[in-house]
Image (cartoon, helix red, strand yellow):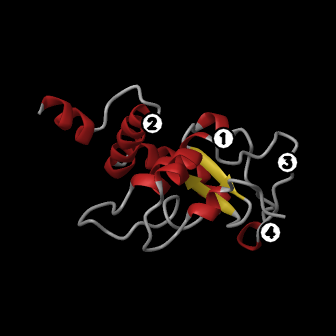
Amino acid sequence: MSRVNDVGMFIKAGRNLTDNEKHIVLTNAWIPPVSYSFPILEPNKERKLKFQNHWLTSYSWLLYSEIKSGAFCRFCVVFAKCGGVGNQKLGFLSSEPFNNWKKAKEVFNKHSTLEYHKTAALKADSFLSVFSKKQKSIVDALDDDR
């Protein structure tokens, strides 16, 4: 059974999210309860590894998708368009689910330091300020200056 506002519902190749969809991913995405039983996926069966709920508190940007059976970065899902050296295509945590739990902490720590992640986090802050009317949009600010 898929969950309402599961981040996996918002992974849409070639389509921009609406402002309401962006707001949902950034502020109201489904988060599994502490009692949630994460599945052991095929690549992790031998070692019986599965997603750990405490990662969600260790990495405030992290979301788990039941639909996609993996982890995503809420900021990068919404705002990252390309990443890495030479503007490579986005992959794990942005447009593809990450589910190699053996390397999870290493990958999550590295992701936190990537420039496109930091830029996406700044864009998320700005978007939320404008969306909640704490700050005027650039269009409104320029219009007021006229």
Do tag 2 and tag 3 residues touch (Cβ < 8 Å)?
Answer: no
Q: State whether residue 27 appears in this view.
A: yes
Query: Residue at position x 55%, y 65% from top?
Result: 11
Residue topped by disc 1: 56
Q: Is residue 62 left or right of residue 37?
A: left
| Relative height, residue 22 to residue 43 (above, below) | above
Residue 56: x and y in percent read: 66, 41
Residue 36, label in figure: 3
**Gap between marks 2 and 1 measured at Cα:** 20 Å
Mark 2 or mark 1: whose residue is earlier in sequence: 1
Mark 2 or mark 4: whose residue is earlier in sequence: 4
Nearer to us of marks 2 and 1 is 2
**Gap between marks 1 and 4 measured at Cα:** 22 Å
- Label 2 Cα neighbours within 10 Å, binned few <14 / some 14-19 / many ≥20: some
| Residue 127 lies in quadrant | top left
Q: Is residue 134 left or right of residue 26?
A: left
Type of amino acid under label 3: Tyr
Q: State whether residue 107 appears in this view.
A: no
Type of amino acid under label 2: Leu
Mark 1 or mark 4: whose residue is earlier in sequence: 4
Name the residue at the top extreme. 134
Query: Residue at position x 19%, y 37% from top?
Result: 143
Residue 45, label in figure: 4
**Gap between marks 2 and 3 measured at Cα:** 29 Å
Observer-nearest of 40 and 83:
83
Residue topped by disc 2: 128
**Gap between marks 3 and 4 measured at Cα:** 18 Å
